[in-house]
Image (cartoon, rainbow, N blue to C red):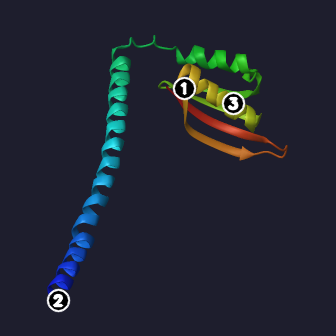
């Protein structure tokens, strides 16, 4: 009877300490393998995209001055510019008073279409709600 009880206790301990963790680890490893396979497919797709982009011809260089002027005229903000200077491929603009949403929309389009982005900005609130004084430095 004691031997049978000992075998039963030993079997129970072996099942709890060996078999159950082994089965749990197998399930976890199967899930990890599936996730790794998905990551591998994504990585291959990313490599193909990078290779395609690296081999694509570069777009023609954009004349920053002309692109800036066209963008200001197209957005109707040319008259709002109180100062515009160019120094070493950087444009320094001052808007004495401009609607903040119009400024943000214009800057988004300027970066997307002409590749000019803000490298320095000083914005001061104005008395009129929603308007700011904007001093910007733009660069390609």
Give the mark nearer the N terminus: 2 vs 1: 2
Where 88 sits versus 97, above or below?
above
Where 68 sits versus 28, above or below?
above
Give the mark nearer the N terminus: 2 vs 3: 2
Residue receiving disc 2: 2
Residue receiving disc 1: 116
Q: Extreme right residue here?
A: 128
Q: Give me the C-alpha separation between circle 2 and circle 3.
A: 84 Å
Q: Give me the C-alpha separation between circle 3 and circle 1.
A: 14 Å
Q: Would residue 108 appear left or right of 60 to someone viewing this image?
A: right
Q: Would residue 2 appear left or right of 126 to someone viewing this image?
A: left
Question: In the structure shown, which secondary structural element does the residue marked by tag 2 occupy?
Answer: helix
Q: Extreme front residue here?
A: 1
Q: Position of residue 69 (x, y in %)?
A: 64, 17
User: Which class describes the residues within 10 Å of circle 1: few (<14), some (14-19), or many (20+)?
Assistant: many
Give the mark nearer the N terminus: 3 vs 1: 3
Where 49 sits versus 99, above or below?
above
Q: Position of residue 3 (x, y in %)?
A: 14, 85
Q: Tell us which disc is closer to us: 3 or 1.
A: 3
Determine the image quadrant of residue 116: top right
Q: Residue at x 69, y 30 (%)?
A: 105
Residue receiving disc 3: 105
Q: Nearer the viewer, residue 85 or 138?
A: 138
Q: Extreme left residue here?
A: 3
């Amino acid at each position: 009877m004691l031997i049978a009880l000992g075998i039963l206790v030993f079997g129970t301990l072996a099942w709890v300490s060996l078999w159950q963790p082994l089965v749990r680890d197998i399930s976890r490893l199967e899930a990890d393998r599936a996730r790794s396979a998905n990551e591998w497919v994504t990585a291959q797709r990313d490599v193909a995209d990078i290779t395609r982009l690296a081999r694509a011809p570069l777009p023609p260089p954009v004349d920053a001055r002309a692109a800036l002027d066209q963008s200001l005229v197209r957005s109707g903000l040319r008259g709002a510019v109180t100062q515009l200077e160019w120094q070493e491929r950087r444009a320094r603009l001052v808007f004495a008073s401009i609607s903040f949403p119009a400024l943000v929309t214009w800057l988004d389009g300027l970066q997307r279409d002409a590749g000019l982005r803000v490298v320095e900005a000083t914005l001061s609130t104005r008395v009129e709600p929603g308007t700011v004084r904007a001093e910007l430095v733009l660069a390609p």
